[in-house]
Image (cartoon, helix red, strand yellow):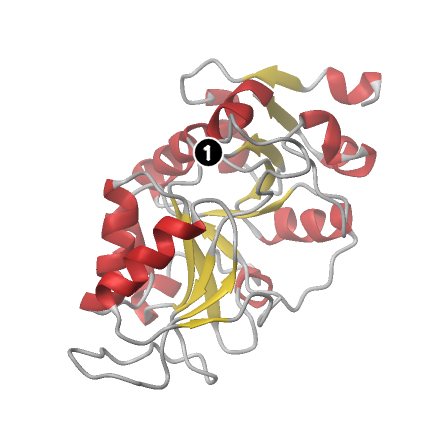
Amino acid sequence: MSHLSQDKQIKWSGEPSQSAIDLLQGEGNVVVCPTKVGYIITVSDKKGLERKFSAKNRKRNKPGVVLCGSLEQLHELAELNAETAAVYQTCWENDVLFGAILPWKESGKTYIPADGSEELMTDVRGTSCFVIKFGVPGEQISKALWEKDHTLLFASSANPSGKGNRGLVEGIGEQIAEEADLIIESNDYVASIQPDKSIKTRYEQGVMVSFVDKEGKLIPEQGDQRSITPAPVLIRKGLDVDKIQMYLSDTFNSWDYRHGEYY
């Protein structure tokens, strides 16, 4: 990492990073933050999203990731039913990183900045991936932004496109390091989540599940029925995939495992 990016790097103190919160309440800023699985780029508006895509040389067809610092925020933004909400609740109670593709509530969309962010935050079906329990440093920021003035936190992995950052701030690459306005370093925190894993065996990402059908509508509740379609689809394996498969099985008789289906 260059000398230039060293100047804007701070170490996570365990407390919410006020400098990150201030930047993300401003316009077009980019903050790199540690999570349970590695480093992410966080932004809060269209200008920030544009900078994120440019720093990653990234295609724009993927659904955006919305980081939720509380279940209340999740319910305010996304459309859920009792069964999909139950999986989030269980993950929340067990501090398990979880993200699912969901439709936005019409009322939830009013929190998306009216600057064209929606086009970059949703896929063609109008869905986004809503993530909880992604790691304390970012959860603190997301919660503070939402509680203060309902600012949303959008995220993407801080990887040079096609490469992982290996859970090390040094792995985010020169381009992302140059683009960021602030880099919060906590390699120790990231390493503490998968202490028994090596660089080769660690998960670089969280589990992602789709709770929508092909048109982007929320899947209907299953109740006691069996062999139901559409059903939840686990579209990306990752940290705690074994626990999440168990939670899905506790709530749904039918769900599919199709790693890579969306991405």
Q: Residue at x 50, y 22 (%)?
A: 189
Q: Residue at x 58, y 70 (%)?
A: 262
Residue identified by numbered label 1: 138
Residue sitting nearer the eye, 152 or 258: 258
Residue 6 is situated, as x and y percent measured from the top left of the image, at 74, 17
Q: Residue at x 56, y 46 (%)?
A: 205
Residue 49 is situated, as x and y percent measured from the top left of the image, at 63, 51
Q: Is residue 92 visible?
A: yes
On-image quarter of the N terminus: top right
Residue 215 is situated, as x and y percent measured from the top left of the image, at 46, 85
Mark 1 neighbour density, 10 Å: few (under 14) some (14–19) many (20 or more): many
Residue sitting nearer the eye, 37 or 158: 37
Q: Dividing the picture into quarters, in which one does residue 252 lie?
A: bottom left
Residue sitting nearer the eye, 83 or 155: 83
Left or right position of 139 against 47: left
Residue 35 is situated, as x and y percent measured from the top left of the image, at 51, 34
Left or right position of 120 against 114: right
On-image quarter of the C terminus: bottom right
Q: Secondary structure at mark 1?
A: helix
Residue sitting nearer the eye, 185 or 207: 207
The kind of residue tagged 1 is Gly
Q: Dividing the picture into quarters, in which one does residue 169 lie?
A: top right
